[in-house]
Image (spheres, helix red, strand yellow):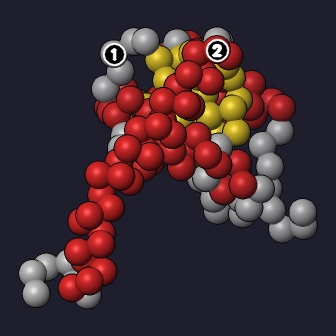
Amino acid sequence: MEGYFELNSEQIETIIHTLRKSVAPWLIILFGSYAKGRARGDSDIDIAYLTDQVVNEYQTFCMAQGLADLLGKSCDCINLKLVSTVFQVQVVGYGKVLYCQDETRRKYYFLRTYKEYALLNEEREPILKRIKERGTIYGG
């Protein structure tokens, strides 16, 4: 599509190699504008991962900065263990898997994410119904 950018195979390999070296992920997912085929010249590269290692937000930030240096583009990396169910379901639903060490485990994770999201929606339903009835979030 004219005007939009894609990652080439070399960039994808750089992402996979860098993350595998840094955090040993079993799953890497590209999400955001690059996954949707709507990346512009100023779009950043959004990458989510899952690992069995304990990785804090600072380590993830440093990895993203190193990746940005290698790719020449701003990068955001997220550890899916540290984000909300709503965020996880967006990544799972609209992202593109770049690397998967264990397909059965990936399927289980995706299924569990959708299940947790469905349960969350069931729990939120009475609250959202009250908000709709009152026409406001705060009191009324």
Where in the figure is residue 65, as x and y percent of width and height? 48, 37
Residue 129 located left or right of residue 48? left
- Dot 1, crowdedness within 10 Å: few (<14), some or many (≥20)? few
Task: Return the disc, 2 or 1, that comes first in the chain's sequence.
Answer: 1
Q: Residue at x 41, y 38 (%)?
A: 116
Q: Amino acid at mark 1?
A: Val
Q: Which label is found at residue 104?
A: 2
Discs 2/1, front: 2
Which secondary structure lies at badge 1?
loop
**62 or 96, which lies in front?**
96
Q: Is residue 86 above or below residue 69?
A: below
Residue 108 is at least partly visible in this image: yes
Residue 51 located left or right of residue 127? right
Where in the figure is residue 70, as x and y percent of width and height? 63, 33
- Give the spatial CA distance, label 2 vs label 1: 22 Å
Residue with the mark numbered 1: 54
Q: Residue at x 24, y 65 (%)?
A: 127
Residue 18 is at least partly visible in this image: no
In the rendered image, which quarter contains the N terminus? bottom right
Q: Is residue 20 above or below residue 137?
A: above
